[in-house]
Image (spheres, rainbow, N blue to C red):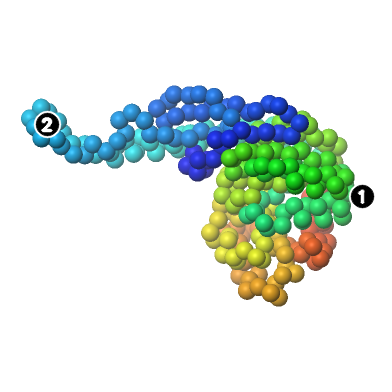
Amino acid sequence: MCTTCGCGEGETKIEGDDLHHAHEHTHADGTMHSHPHDHAHAHGHGDDHDHGHQHPGQEHHGYRPHSHDHAHEHEHSRTVKLEQDILAKNNAYAAQNRERFAAQGILALNLVSSPGSGKTTLLVKTIEALQAKLPIAVVEGDQQTSHDAERIRATGAPAVQINTGKGCHLDAHMVGHALEKLPLDNGSVLMIENVGNLVCPAAFDLGEAGKVVILSVTEGEDKPLKYPDMFRAARLMIVNKCDLLPYLQFDVEKAIAYARRVNPLIEVIRVAATTGEGMADWLAWIEKGAAAVRG
């Protein structure tokens, strides 16, 4: 969670918008100040230090050495509460996003992965193949630059870039604000390309119909075991860059088995976005989901 990873100290900027999101930043001692991102971080203040020692003569004045275990217990409880508060706020925004998607018959998918998995290339190929059948729009999440959004717009699809600064994931409030700037027709497919990270995005609901985790064969097949929260939260795993398998030592079957160990219900599609291998299955999966949302 962001209360422990330390992300979010920078400003979140949504393309075309001068608004910098200022949210409350709550310290462990209860003090608050404005914060440019909807995260809270626990810091130890006051007397939460280790004083488990004596100075000469102190035993004669009622001094008793005390343990810092009690302070740690309070610090932990404050951290847990902050994390719960953060997720509760996020989930409220996610519910608003979900209501909008349902009202407009929009299929929203949250694409998550490590950096370099091929998310953007997969997304570009997907748009090129589907845009004649379905209106597609994209929310792009990166810490800096608008390069990926520019690649998306080159396909003709509308895209809004969110730069999270030091933030390691998108949250539902950011996405909801981006939606205000994104033309979304009824029956659209919305692709949300999250920041490259297999940790924090697992915990944050954006209002999407499902998370799609992309695992590149250039990564280790044990990623599902190393990052179980993400693969447990995902509805679909795409094994990408399969055209490189002849040149790598990557066991696809083992990767799938590991993913299903943490999430027995996860669906799996093997894809090589650059060559088109497996793309038909992925496109059919999207079309089936879009039809189900439209009813």
Q: 10 Å neighbourhood of mark 2: few (<14), some, or many (≥20)?
A: few
Image coordinates of residue 294 in percent, x first then y, are 83, 43
Q: Left of 137 or right of it: where is 62?
A: left
- Residue at 76% x, 31% y: name it: 16
Query: Total number of numbered labels?
Result: 2
Could you tell me which quadrant the C terminus lies in? top right
- Residue at 36% x, 30% y: name it: 45
Q: Left of 154 or right of it: where is 79?
A: left
Callout 1: helix, strand or loop?
loop
Vertical comparison of 155 with 66: above or below: below
- Residue at label 1? 132
Q: Quadrant of residue 66?
A: top left
Q: What's the residue type where badge 1 is placed?
A: Ala
Mark 1 or 2: in front is 2
Q: What's the residue type where badge 2 is placed?
A: Gln
The reply to whether the C-beta atoms of the residues labelled 1 and 2 are less than 8 Å apart is no
Q: 10 Å neighbourhood of mark 1: few (<14), some, or many (≥20)?
A: few
Extreme-bottom residue of the structure:
246
Tag 2 or tag 1, which sits nearer the N-term?
A: 2
Callout 2: helix, strand or loop?
helix
Q: Quadrant of residue 69?
A: top left
- Residue at label 2? 58
Q: Left of 143 or right of it: where is 84?
A: left
Q: Nearer the viewer, residue 228 or 13?
A: 13
Q: Nearer the viewer, residue 111 or 187?
A: 111
Image coordinates of residue 249 in percent, x first then y, are 63, 74
How much space separates mark 1 and mark 2, taking CA atoms? 81 Å
